[in-house]
Image (cartoon, helix red, strand yellow):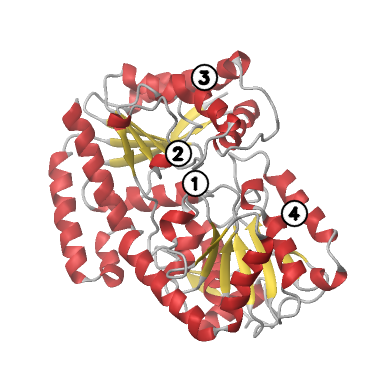
Amino acid sequence: MSRLYDVTPPARDPRLLEQSIGAERYAAFAAAGRDAAERFAGRKIVNINSTPAGGGVAEMLESLVSYARGLDIDAQWHVIEGDERFFEITKRIHNHIYGLPGDDGPLGEAEHADYFAVHQGVQARLAEIVGPDDIVVVHDPQPAGLVPLAKQLGVPVLWRCHIGVDVSTPHDVEGWEFIRRYVEPADTYLLTRVEYAPDWMERGRLRTLRSSIDPMAPKNRPLEPQFVRDVLAHYGLIAGSAPAGLTFTRKDGSTSPIARRADILQAGPPAPADAPLVVQISRWDRMKDMPGVARAFADHLLDTDAHLALVGPAISGYADDPEGAEQMLEAMSAWRALPGAARERIHLACIPMTDLEENALVINALQRHAAVITQKSISEGFGLTVVEAMLKGTPVVGSTVGGLLEQIVDAESGLLVEASDLAGFADALRRLLTDADYAAKIGDAGRERALDLFTADRHLARYGKLIGETLARR
């Protein structure tokens, strides 16, 4: 059973961005938006991915589509839904393109048949959505089977892939080869880094596109320090008591109670509110190497007064990730194998996803409270949590992989370490934990870089240019 359904958000006033990017830059963005609205008049820009919530792609689409609509561009967002077998196959593709074996399952003709059947099941719905003058943007491997079906409708198709590895392996070659028959007909390939592109991808149709964040989204908007502490205390992420009746303001201006709490695995009380807190926030995914972060901290940083929080979603939070529960259990098992002294200082937390705005508020508060944010990924398509932390002026330590290399300039806007170097990773954390002036310098430079390169206005302007180029080539 499959379906293709509309999750297009309402228009958002792009003037909200002005308070973050400044009047001059906003004026240039607004002028480019007016030009794009004129060029794309009478066309829909139909974005398709595989989940309406959870993960960086969904967050970006919600922001970009709503701002585009605020610029009078008819941007839409639709989600393909498949069965358990479909997401088993797409997770296997995902792992392979990241250079990993995943579940070691096959990617043969049986998998092609089951994968493409989901896309054929929504072919009629796709024809209802897409008109003859429209533009289709398909995101990542999950809905890639819609590329040839959209091409049959005679419209331009861009395929946006947010994942990949810099150095090819037999696994990523197999993953890319699986989706080749579906994505090769696309008019334009949009990759985060040119290094991700397989050999068969025609370079004349290949363009790069960086990911972005919305500085005014609930996950990024400013929060008062006391409110940050109250939110984290309420969720049990730091010690202390929150005031009764704690509330937050939603995107629509309404007020809601902060009603949920984190599910936390720990061997003692929460981290003291005044203790330096090292935080990694990500999916429960082997590529994020949560166990490696814990080992580095346990082996090298127990002589500090810092605590470590490994934070992920409640396992029901991502419809397109069937391995999330397994990976969370692996992280829990790795935690239980640590010495008792380490378990007292390392906390595993699951944040509920039932209210996405409240979830975003908690992540925002964690990133602001943290002494250091880490992203010790083995592979990383981009890694939005890094630029989110940078925007808040929180210093970051990342691995020398993939999209983290796009965001962090080593020893300038963050620190970079080989993913396998646990001692070096711990040394980078120690320097930021023990040298407040250096940490502040890194944090300030990170914020400047995030605002300069990785905000929604930059992303939308680049998208407009690339869609225009695609139309011009037809």
Compared to residue 219, the image places residue 4 above or below, namely: above
- Which amino acid type is marked by label 4? Ala
- Measure how far apart labels 2 and 4 are at the Cα level: 28 Å
> Could you classify mark 2 by the number of other residues whose Cα lies within 10 Å: few (under 14), some (14-19), or many (20 or more)?
many
Q: Along the horizontal axis of the image, is 420 left or right of 389?
A: right
Q: Would you name the residue on which mark 4 appears?
A: 331
Q: Earlier in the sequence, mark 3 or mark 4?
A: 3
Helix, strand or loop for disc 1: loop
User: Residue at coordinates 56% horizontally, 76% vertically from top-left?
Assistant: 369
Residue positioned 75% across, 54% down in the render = 331
Mark whose residue sits in front, 3 or 4: 4
> Where is residue 11 shown, x and y percent of the image?
30, 52
Query: CB atoms at circles 3 and 4 under 8 Å apart?
Result: no
Q: Nearer the viewer, mark 2 or mark 3?
A: 2
Indicate the secondary structure of the residue bearing disc 2: helix
Neighbor class of circle 3 (other Cα within 10 Å; few <14, some 14-19, many 20+) is some
Q: Nearer the viewer, mark 1 or mark 2?
A: 2
Of tags 2 and 4, which is closer to the observer?
A: 2
Distance in Å between CA atoms under marks 1 and 2 = 9 Å
Marks 3 and 1, how far apart at CA: 24 Å
Residue wearing tag 2: 196
Residue at the spot of label 1: 381
Local packing at callout 4 (Cα closer than 10 Å; few below 14, some 14-19, many 20+) is: many
- Say which amino acid is labelled 3: Phe
Dot 2 or dot 4, earlier in sequence: 2
Compute the Cα span from label 2 to label 3: 24 Å
